Image: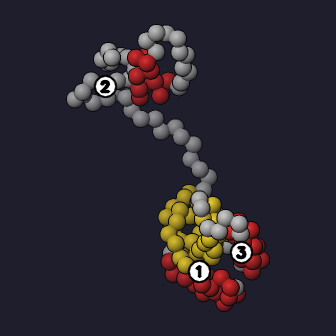
Amino acid sequence: MALLSAQNTIVDSINAAGTITIEQPAALNARLVAEPQGEASDVEPTTDVAKPTRAARSGYRIMVFDDNNVRTAKNAAQVRKSQVQARFPQHRVYVVFNSPYWRVKVGDFRTRAEAEHVMSEIRAAIPAAASSLRIVRDRINATD
């Protein structure tokens, strides 16, 4: 295989026969330019990525359901979500499937103390969920 020069890209070396057409943004092409070993690149990284409207930050959520039963977990997660939403409409409820587990998490809490307070309220309001309640660190949707 031929060595890449400073002006050739990886795509150019793959496409030596000229039979492949690749369309790509100019910024990606600039990042693909091969750097000679030991030299730093003069290409600045682009930062024109759109920012999300809500900032995701580290925080806490309360897990109120966690099951991997193939036949019943999805429906049970939806039932638990409905129970929690009915009694605690002020908190967001998230149903998450991370194979093979279905999980239901409540809230976007910045501190563990906030999560513990709400967890005690959930424990009192939904006794059936008491055995599966626990606080987990998670990326939360912070609203300022």
Q: Secondary structure at mark 1?
A: loop
Instruction: Point out the tag, 1 or 3, that comes first from the N-terminus.
Output: 3
> Mark 2 is on which residue type?
Glu
Please provide percent x and percent y for residue 68.
61, 67
Residue 124 placement: quadrant: bottom right
**Which marked residue is nearer to the observer: mark 2 or mark 1?**
1
Q: State the mark number for residue 92.
A: none
Q: CA distance from mark 1 to mark 3?
A: 12 Å
Residue at the extreme left of the image, as rendered: 38
At 71% from the left edge and 75% from the top edge, which residue is drawn? 80
For the residues labelled 1 and 3, say whether their Cβ atoms are less than 8 Å apart.
Answer: no
Q: Is residue 58 above or below residue 49?
A: below
Please provide percent x and percent y for residue 131.
60, 84
Q: Is residue 2 above or below residue 136?
A: above
Q: Secondary structure at mark 3?
A: helix
Q: Nearer the viewer, residue 24 or 66?
A: 66
Q: Secondary structure at mark 2?
A: loop
Q: Which residue is mark 1?
A: 133
Q: Which residue is mark 2?
A: 35
Q: Which residue is mark 3?
A: 80
Q: CA distance from mark 2 to mark 3?
A: 55 Å
Please provide percent x and percent y for residue 6.
32, 18
